[in-house]
Amino acid sequence: MSASSSDRVQKWFLKYQHVFVFSAPVLFIVGVVFAAPTTPNDPGLDYWLEFWWLFVPFLLGATIVNTVGISGSAIFVPFLIFIFPLFANPLEPETLVKVGLISEAFGLSSSSVAFIQYGLVDRRLALTLVGGAIPFVVGGALLSFVIPEPVFHALLGLALLAAAYLLFKTNLDHGGSEDDADAAADGGTAAAESAAADLPDDADKLGPAGVETAADGTVTRVDRDGDDYSYTRGGYLRRAANYSIGGTFQGLAGFGIGELGIISMLGTKVPVRVAIGTNHIVVALTAILASLVHVFGGGLVGGHSLSIASTPWNMVVFTVPATVTGGQIAPYVSNALSTRTIKRFVAGLFGVIATALFLMAAGLG
């Protein structure tokens, strides 16, 4: 296939990505209903519709976390620990993490494609980060099979407290400050117009989007709305440290790499919208990896062996389409609402949940 044909195919895929994205959960549900082994020998309609109500909280949770650029399981797992048992039987830790990861993998994959469509993903940076995080994600996932439940809750609480602190501390607003905006309005209009002709505009991207890397390593990126961003990919060691710790928690509890990862990218001067978009790729791929280990890896470490049949399929047939929908909504919400408000809400929620988890770990919950 020639370069021009490849560009046309890529542009066509991005233009109609929502069709392909929403086809994935349909195929998943059909495959689960007709092919996945389930606990009941002959599951009827009552079995498949038992957890229909999970669609709403998972849709809301996926929209929130994808807007901020953090791991979906940071909300899904605590929801399954505290809220889910009020309406159904409690889940084992490894099972609820698995449900959270499977749902998160679909939701973040959906949101990742949407952010790619907007031109806000640095794929080279994302793949480098994923490669470095893989052994830590696998190790954390295997550890989840043998770690005692009180310790699991305590570690979950610590991860949430750290995420809450980092979210409060970090500026996740998509734009610059008001002072920067005023300065641009006063004297930068003519300069911006003259520089616009020099900005990259790739044929395989939607709108005036493009990306180019200068000889000195400076990356210039333009999104589909015409906004441009300039940064370098330096700071690999700092990001590697954060993603290794976050990757361990990603495998263990289903979240962590997104929260620590977004902080490290902003700390190395990656623009916030590019950091959030790129982080979606990292979290999505590591969530898929962690999901596979949680489904198949229990027997490797002498822990609880989770067969495919033990997966609560009647839950994920509703949580997967919910998170896919939330992932598609997120880029629009991120442009319409103040991310500062959303991240403060999420950080406060993390603090409350962490307190409850510490009480459970101490046997008081």
Image (cartoon, helix red, strand yellow):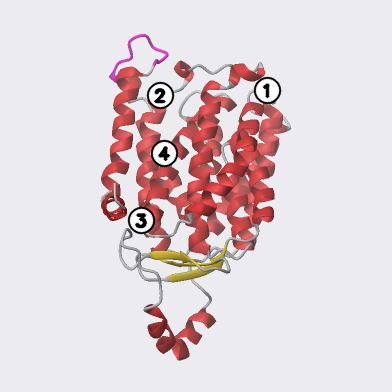
Tell me residue 172's x, y (percent).
Answer: 54, 63
Q: Amino acid at mark 2?
A: Trp
**For the residues carrying marks 2 and 3, which lies nearer the camera in this image?**
3
For label 1, the crowd category at 10 Å Cα-Cα, with few meaning under 14, some 14 to 19 and many 20 or more, is some
Q: In the image, 264: left or right of 272?
A: right
For label 3, the crowd category at 10 Å Cα-Cα, with few meaning under 14, some 14 to 19 and many 20 or more, is many
Tell me residue 57's x, y (percent).
Answer: 42, 41
The residue that label 3 is drawn on is 117
The residue that label 1 is drawn on is 146
Q: Residue at x 36, y 33 (%)?
A: 318
**For the residues carrying marks 1 and 3, which lies nearer the camera in this image?**
3
Label 4 to label 3: alpha-carbon separation: 17 Å
Question: Which secondary structure lies at badge 1?
Answer: loop
Question: Which secondary structure lies at badge 4?
Answer: helix
Q: Looking at the image, is mark 4 or mark 3 earlier in the sequence?
A: 4
Q: Are marks 4 and 3 in contact (CB under 8 Å)?
A: no
Label 2 to label 3: alpha-carbon separation: 31 Å
Q: Amino acid at mark 3?
A: Gln
